[in-house]
Image: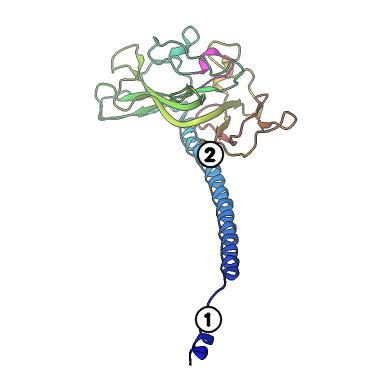
Amino acid sequence: MKKNTLKTITGMTLIEVLIGVLISSIMIGAMYTTYNVVNNSYSQVTDKAKISRSGRDIVEMLMRDIRMAGYKYYLGINNLGLPERSYLEFKDGRDNFAESHHGIVIIKAVDPEAIGHNIDGDATPLLKNNTNDMCCDKIHIVYDDFNQNDPIQPYKRYRITYYAEPINDANGNDPRYGVYRSKQSWIQVLGDETGAWSSECTECYKSELIRDHLVDMEFIPFDREGRVIIPAPRPDNISRNNLTRITAVDVRLSFRSKREFFKFEPTADKPRFVKGLTDRTRQFMDKYLRDSVVVTIHTRNIGT
């Protein structure tokens, strides 16, 4: 009876156990490798999507503001006792660029005034992260509005400014730029002959960070024939007569990923490039991903 009982007992030998452990290890390793590949791919897609989303969000703001540039409000005959048209004075800005009321004024990156926005006129000029940086252009956009519920100043005028400022982490190890936006109002109450720009109005704001990790921001003005206006017109340069002839603006926004994207750094013979609309092409030797959003925005109130 004992011999028959022993013959019915089954089990696994040590070799079989080791084979099972080996197969399980191979399967777990394959699953982990697959997970890493999928996770890295997801992270890359997410980083690309964030860069694209950053550009689209700012482009929407720029489109709205540039299309409003140069807008003048005309009330016409009314029973409110208000002027039919805006009484706000127009400042050409030829003698004092900071007071300009022109619809669009572009300050190119080569100008020391391009970085930062000295709203109050008493700030220390900002320096670029690197003297070789081509970042970034600045743009002033001016348009009018009207508020009949404001008896002190019914006619309004606003100036929106998009510009870049240097940003760094606490340890100074990640120098980059951010896109900022400011809004000022021309204060000239009804009956006054002159006024001044102010950032203290209710609807105003200054140095509002819109997006971080900016690489470059470029604005190219065009006339009605589709020709690039060179140099970009300003009240104080030789191209100032073209300030009223801007019919479109090409906008390029280039951003980089928040964290390193590529596994390896580029080699000297194959660097990574960010191409500009003109001669603003730069090469980079790090692992960050950079991408650009380019759009043409047509003005509605200038150049007609």
23 sits left or right of 141 in the view? right
User: Where is residue 73 shown, x and y percent of the image?
Assistant: 39, 28
Q: Is residue 117 or residue 46 the one in the foreground?
A: 46
Q: Residue at x 34, y 13 (%)?
A: 195
Residue 304 seen from this side:
no
Q: Is mark 1 on a helix, strand or loop?
A: loop
Q: Residue at x 60, y 65 (%)?
A: 23
User: Where is residue 128 shown, x and y percent of the image?
Assistant: 53, 17
Q: How many labels does the image show?
A: 2
Picture quarter with the C terminus: top right
Kindly give the residue lying farthest to the bottom in the view shown: 1
Residue occupied by mark 1: 10
**Vertical arrangement, residue 297 with respect to residue 194, above or below:** below
Q: Is residue 281 or residue 82 the one in the foreground?
A: 281
**Vertical arrangement, residue 184 with respect to residue 235, above or below:** below
Residue occupied by mark 2: 51
User: Where is residue 154 shown, x and y percent of the image?
Assistant: 30, 25
User: How far is disc 2 from disc 1 in space, using C-alphas?
Assistant: 62 Å
Of the residues shown, which amino acid type is indicated by label 2? Ile
Kindly give the residue lying farthest to the front in the view shown: 2
Query: What colour-coding does the image apply?
Result: rainbow
| Label 1 neighbour load within 10 Å: few <14, some 14-19, many 20+ | few
Q: Is residue 224 or residue 166 the one in the foreground?
A: 166
Q: Is mark 2 on a helix, strand or loop?
A: helix
Which quadrant of the view contains residue 226?
top right
Which quadrant of the view contains residue 180?
top left
Magenta segment: does it hold 159?
Answer: no
Q: What stretch is highlighted in magenta?
A: 104-115
| Label 2 neighbour load within 10 Å: few <14, some 14-19, many 20+ | many
Residue 96 seen from this side:
yes
100 sits left or right of 110 in the view? left
